[in-house]
Amino acid sequence: MSKAQETVLEINLKALEHNYNYLKSKIKPNCKFLGVVKAYAYGSDSVRISQKLVDLGIDYLAVAYAEEGVTLRNAGIRVPILVLHSQIVSFDTIIERCLEPSIYSERILREFIISAEKHGQKDYPIHIKFNTGLNRLGFNESDIPKIIKILSETNAVKVLSIFSHLAASEDLNEKEFTENQIRSFNTIASQIEAALPYKPFKHLANTSGIINFPEAHLDMVRSGIGLYGFGNDDNEDSNFIPVATLKTNISQIHSLEPNESVGYNRAFTATEKIKTATLPLGHADGIGREYGNGKGVVRIHGQNAPIIGNTCMDMIMVDVTAIDCQEGDEVIVFGQDPTATKFAEGAKTISYELITGISQRVKRVFVD
Ligand SMILES: *Cc1c(COP(=O)(O)O)cnc(C)c1O
């Protein structure tokens, strides 16, 4: 590992490979694998992550919005790309760049068919999304007759797959709810299969679905957070390696006397002599105000240094009274230890939010 001279997000592509292989070991050889690379590949780098996943033999990629798929196509990525939250304004882009839309409502279905017909398409691949309890995006089971009727009136599109999304696959207290979602999706699938002249493939499981619900693997699984090194569970986490490490270095050290304060609004006041370190990292980099005042704890030479006072835009100050350290020394914000899950806990949030929020100002460096 390199030593940080500035704030960097170090992306370990070997860790990605490890996580991919671990998740692959959980599924049957004929089950396809979709890598979710939305939101800059969960805050890392969608192009480098996708290229590595393609090298590893990934079958599918998914992004949230069409423009994210365009970035991948511009980088020469040729595998199929599912656009999870397709928007009507981007249908032309989707078709021009061979992206595959998730179709989640009648409005979206009708509009996409118009676009596909306008572009002279025949059998353009679409993926129909069903709502089985998340109540976020998707058709309901009762919409099936209408979907089938609309599809029967055109040959511009073809349903390549049908899918749904689990609401609580990481939470075994909600096992029954998840099992109901799986049952409900299977019922939907059999109705679709009976009504269409061809058989779409089926997918349902996200990372925790892969781990906890083998019966939900179906024809393909979709993993995001697991690829980036998180198992959404204290025991499972040990099977993964976090891909991203946020590291920085000490810009300046201050010695404070009792009653001196630190940072904006004087949110922290020393009650005794202390030593503080100022770090080049702030809320503009994705370490928000919720990490201030002791909620976030970084690691310097293996020791804990809590953030003191308010988080500034470009800086945070940490308490290093008990740490033998110097200006220029390396600081680990999250990575293998503490993990993003652990760091995020301090601010009562989750790894997903922390890692996707590291802003584009932070330089990405790669290890392979
Ligand atoms: C984001 C997303 C995923 C990935 O979920 P993880 O919990 O990160 O594995 C899978 N499917 C859909 C529809 C998603 O939106």
Image: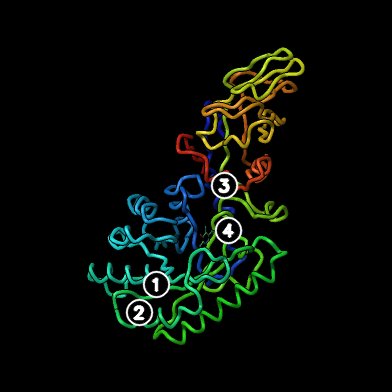
Alpha carbon separation for disc pair 1 and 3 = 31 Å
Q: Are marks 3 and 4 in contact (CB under 8 Å)?
A: no
Residue tagged by mark 3?
A: 353
Depicted 291 relative to depicted 161: above or below:
above
Depicted 33 relative to depicted 291: above or below:
below
Binning the other alpha carbons within 10 Å of mark 3 as few (below 14), some (14 to 19) or many (20 upward) gives some
Residue tagged by mark 1?
A: 106
Q: Where is residue 262 in the image (x, y as percent from the top left)?
A: 64, 20
Nearer-N-terminus badge (2/3): 2
The image quadrant of residue 360 is: top left
Nearer-N-terminus badge (3/4): 4
Residue tagged by mark 2?
A: 150
Alpha carbon separation for disc pair 2 and 4 = 41 Å
Nearer-N-terminus badge (2/4): 4
Relative horizontal placement of residue 234, taking residue 151 as reference (left or right): right
Label 3 secondary element: helix
Label 1 secondary element: helix
Is residue 337 something that shows in the picture? no
Alpha carbon separation for disc pair 3 and 4 = 25 Å
- The amino acid on which the numbered mark 3 sits, given as a three-letter code, is Glu
Residue tagged by mark 4?
A: 21
Depicted 221 relative to depicted 302: above or below:
below
Q: Position of residue 19 (x, y in %)?
A: 59, 54
- The amino acid on which the numbered mark 4 sits, given as a three-letter code, is Asn
Label 4 secondary element: helix
Who is closer to the viewer here, 239 or 43? 43
